[in-house]
Amino acid sequence: MFRKMLFACMAAVLLSTIAVGPVFAGQDKVTVCHKPGTEDEATLTVAAPAEAAHLGHGDYSGPCRAPQSSGCDALNALVPDPQTETWMYYYAV
């Protein structure tokens, strides 16, 4: 019984690979930015025929852009130097 089930599973995997493989094989790939401006923003590589669907719901072609850093403004500051009574510019990288 176990051998029959194992054979059936292996046959199903083999047939699905043979049937589905040619549909997706060899298609050109494109890069899209999926859900830009949201928490779920991600750079995806999709088949070229799927690009139109992505563009239709607000995605754009190409990789997502890195978000602008807003945290450095608090780290970079002009502060007084109490020892010399002058101002020093401190910055963080």
Image (cartoon, grey):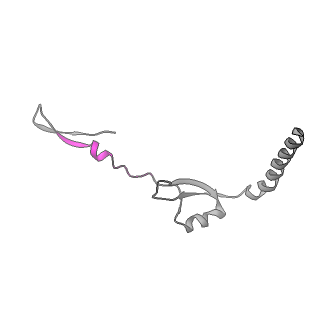
Specify the quadrant that holds the N terminus.
top right
Magenta residues (range): 66-79
Q: Is residue 76 left or right of residue 83?
A: right
Residue 5 x/y as whole percent: 86, 43
Seen from the viewer's position, the closer of residues 7 and 93 is 7
Q: Residue at x 31, y 45 (%)?
A: 72
Taking the spot 77% from the left edge, 55% from the top edge, the residue there is: 20
Residue 64: where, in percent of width, then height? 49, 55
- Residue 19 percent coordinates (x, y): 81, 56
Q: Residue at x 11, y 33 (%)?
A: 84
Classify residue 55 by image quadrant. bottom right
Residue placed farthest to the front in the image?
A: 1
Point out residue 16 in the picture as x, y percentages from the top left corner.
80, 52
Outermost residue on the top side: it is 83
Q: On the picture, is 21 further left or further right than 87? A: right
Q: Is residue 23 left or right of residue 46?
A: right
Q: How many marks?
A: 0
Q: Is 70 included in the stretch rendered in magenta?
A: yes
User: Farthest residue toward the bottom?
Assistant: 56
Residue shown at the point (76%, 59%) measured from the top left: 23
- Quarter of the picture containing the C terminus is top left
* In this view, 17 is above or below 87: below
Quadrant position of residue 50? bottom right
Asked if 61 appears above or below 14 in the picture, the reply is below
Magenta stretch holds residue 13: no
